[in-house]
Amino acid sequence: MSTLVTFDPTPFFSKQQPAETKPFMMQQTMIRVKDPEASLKFYTEILGFKLLMHRDFPQWGFSVYFVAHGVDVVPEDHDERWKLCMTTPGCVELTWNHGSEGTEGNMYNTGNADATGTSNGEKVKGGFGHLGITVPDVYEACDRFHKMGVPFSKSPNGGGMKGLAFIKDPDGYLIEILPQGRMITKPIDCLDTPLEGGAGYKDNSK
C-alpha cells in the first residue's frame, strides 16, 4: 500500500509571479503523429480545432501542424500566421516524421501502460498521460463522438470517476473530456453504461 505524501500547496495560490515572466504564455504541447491527414481530420472535425499554421522541413524529414481552439479566421500571410500561432495559448503541435504513415500498427508510445516501441514488449510506465478538452455537456459531446465512431477508453459512466470521459485520437493518445462547469452525471451514457457500479480509479501509467 502506498503512503500518501502530504504537503501544503496553498501558498502557491498567492505566490507572486516573477516580473520577468509576465509576458510568458503556455503556447503549445507537441505530440508525434503517424498520419497527419488522419490527425488533422480528428482534431478539426471531431474536436473542433482550427489549423493555424504548418511548416514542412524536408531537409530534416518532418512537418509540423499547429491547431488550436478560439480562432475564427486564419491570415493568408505566412508571417501573420506565425504571429497568430505564437500568441495563441493552448496550441497542439502535431509533428509528422516523414515516412511514418507507412508503418503498420501503432507508431508512438502514448505513455499509458503502453508497450509500443519497447524492445522487450514490456509496458512503459510513462510520464505523459493525456490532453484535456472541456465541453458544456460531457454526455452530449460523447454521444456525438460515439456516433462519429471515436474509440473510448472510458465513457462518462465507466470506471469510478463519473461524469468525465476519455477518448482516443488516431495514434491512441488519450483525450480527457471534462465539463466546463460542475461535474454532472446522467443515468445512461453513450455506451449504454449505467451510472451505478463501475470499478475504482486506475492510473493508466502503471
Image: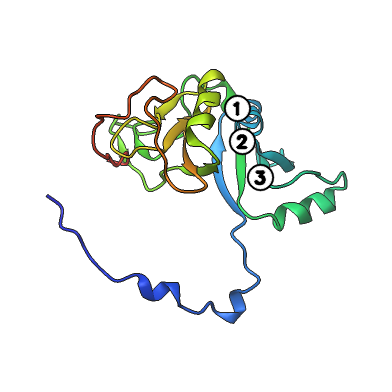
Q: Which amino acid does label 2 sit on?
A: Trp
Does the CB distance between marks 1 and 2 fall below 8 Å? yes
Q: What residue type is labelled 1?
A: Asp
Q: In this view, does 36 lie to the left or right of 130?
A: right
Residue 70 higher or lower than 35, as above or below: below
Q: Element under label 1?
A: loop
| Sequence-earlier tag: 3 or 2 | 3
Mark 1 surroundings within 10 Å by alpha-carbon count, few (fewer than 14), some (14 through 19), many (20 or more) = many
Q: In this view, does 59 lie to the left or right of 151?
A: right
CA–CA distance in space, label 3 to label 1: 19 Å
User: Which residue appears farthest toward the front when viewing the image?
Assistant: 187
The residue lying toward the viewer, choosing from 120 and 185, is: 185
Q: Which amino acid does label 3 sit on?
A: Ala
Residue on which the image places disc 2: 96
Residue 21 image offset from top left, x and y in percent: 59, 74
User: Which residue appears farthest toward the left when viewing the image?
Assistant: 1
Residue on which the image places disc 3: 68
Which corner quadrant holds the C terminus?
A: top left
Mark 3 surroundings within 10 Å by alpha-carbon count, few (fewer than 14), some (14 through 19), many (20 or more) = many
Residue drawn where x is 49% and y is 19% of the image = 104
Residue drawn where x is 71% and y is 58% of the image = 87
Asked whether the viewer can see residue 44, the reply is: yes
Q: Element under label 2?
A: strand
Residue 108 higher or lower than 131, as above or below: above
Per the rendering, the mark at residue 35 is 1
